[in-house]
Each structure stands twice: as C-alpha cells, then as structure tokens.
Image: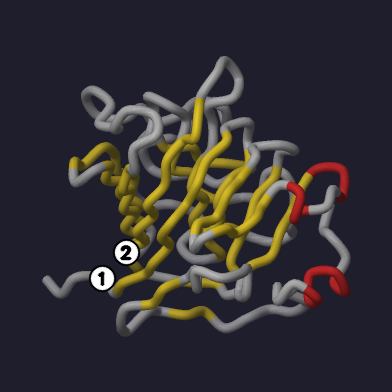
Amino acid sequence: MKFTLAVLLAFGVGHLVCAQPLVKPSGHLELFNGRDFTGWTFCLKGDSNPLATWSVTNGVIHCTGKPTGYLRTVSAYQDYVLTVEWRFVKVAPKQDNSGILVNMQLPDKVWPACVQVQGKHTRQGDLFLMAGAESKEHRGQDANTALPLHGTANEHPVGEWDTVRTVCANGTVTAWVNDRLMNTTTACTVTNGFIGLQSEGGELEIRRLALDPLPIN
C-alpha cells in the first residue's frame, strides 16, 4: 500500500521509518508549502502511484479521488487547531466524498485508527471514530456509525472554498465549518498522531493546511 521510498524522495516526500517525537505547536505552522509534498507521505490501495492521484499546480493540491487512500503528514502532532481550506471541483453519486483525519495511528492502512472529520458533500462535520478508535459519545455504536453534525450543513456551493477548523485538545475533537460549530466528541482513545486527507471518490482541491496553538483560556 505504501509507494516506494525512492520515488517519494525523488519528489521531495518524506517517509516515516521510525517513531517521531510529537510536535505541539507553539506558533503558526503552514503544513503545505505551496510547491510540493515535502513533509507528507501517502498510503493508497493497490500500491498505486500517489502522484497520479495527488498533484500540486499553481499553489493548490489536487486530488482525483481515486484510488482510495490518503495523504498524511510525516510528523505527528498533539493539541492544535488545524485549518483546511478546500473545495470540490465537481460532485456526482459516489464521487462526493473525502475527509480530514486527525490523531492518525500507525501502521499505515486503509483505514488507520483515527478520528475523521467527514468531508462528504452536505455532511461536512460528521465525526467518525475509525478502525477501533473510540470516544465517550461514540462508545457502544457501530464503527460505521458517525456522530452526526449538529443542525444543518454549513457548506458553500460546490466549486466555492470551504474552511474547516478542527480543534484537537486533550482527547477532545471539535469541528467547525465556515465558522459554525458542527460537532464535538470527548475522551477519545487516540489523542495525538498524524494528520491526513482522504482520497475517497471526490475530486477536490486544497489550498491551505495550517496549524496553530490552542487558544489560551
């Protein structure tokens, strides 16, 4: 499922081969440099070439949505505010899905233990506890059952940019879509880890991926 190290390094992409120290942001940090995938690695079904799925043009990441898998950070993080600015290029049945993965655990596989902020069209803000991860609000439910977003969706029309902010703080994950609180879950069993974006059918673009420290109470 992992693409070969030699090819990834040729394109400026790191590959995690041992445990990394956790990064707890103390200041603003741009995760995407606007040029290439430095600081990122990939996991796709079928050991597919990730650069046929993920590309960078004019400072924007493009994802075809096929095959299924993800792009993730090489570094692991704890206690932060993650800002993602993204949009669907187009949507169609079974071509309208993605997600933001936080507190991702090794080994790399489709899918790893983590918390997913749903990116599916009209469902941005649902929370999934994946691959054995659990939380207080989800415990006892089926693994494929999401914690539904609060109220109605707050996405912009297809083709317009949405801003999703995910706050990870001491085992609590909170999701905001376009400045509206959409969901929260507490006492998560995964409290730190890698950050990823799904390739899951939807053709999308990402123009910003950034971390900030938790606000001081």
Quarter of the figure with residue 211: bottom left
Q: Amino acid at mark 1?
A: Leu
Up the image or down, 41 lies above or below 198; here it is: below
Residue at coordinates 49% horizontally, 63% vertically from top-left? 59
Side (left or right) of 194 relative to 6: left
Q: State yes or no: discs 1 and 2 in contact (Cβ < 8 Å).
A: yes
Q: Position of residue 209 (x, y in %)?
A: 43, 62
Side (left or right) of 215 relative to 106: left
Considering depth in this image, is 109 or 57 the residue closer to the camera?
57
Side (left or right) of 102 relative to 199: left
Quarter of the figure with residue 167: bottom left
Residue at coordinates 71% horizontally, 38% vertically from top-left? 68
Up the image or down, 54 lies above or below 111; here it is: below
Location of mark 1 (residue) = 214
Residue at coordinates 66% horizontally, 52% vertically from top-left? 54
- Crowding at label 1, few (<14), some or many (≥20) Cα neighbours within 10 Å? some
Q: CA distance from mark 1 to mark 2?
A: 6 Å
Q: Position of residue 78 (x, y in %)?
A: 43, 71
Q: Position of residue 96 (x, y in %)?
A: 53, 26
Q: Secondary structure at mark 2?
A: strand
Q: Secondary structure at mark 1?
A: loop
- Crowding at label 2, few (<14), some or many (≥20) Cα neighbours within 10 Å? many
Location of mark 2 (residue) = 81
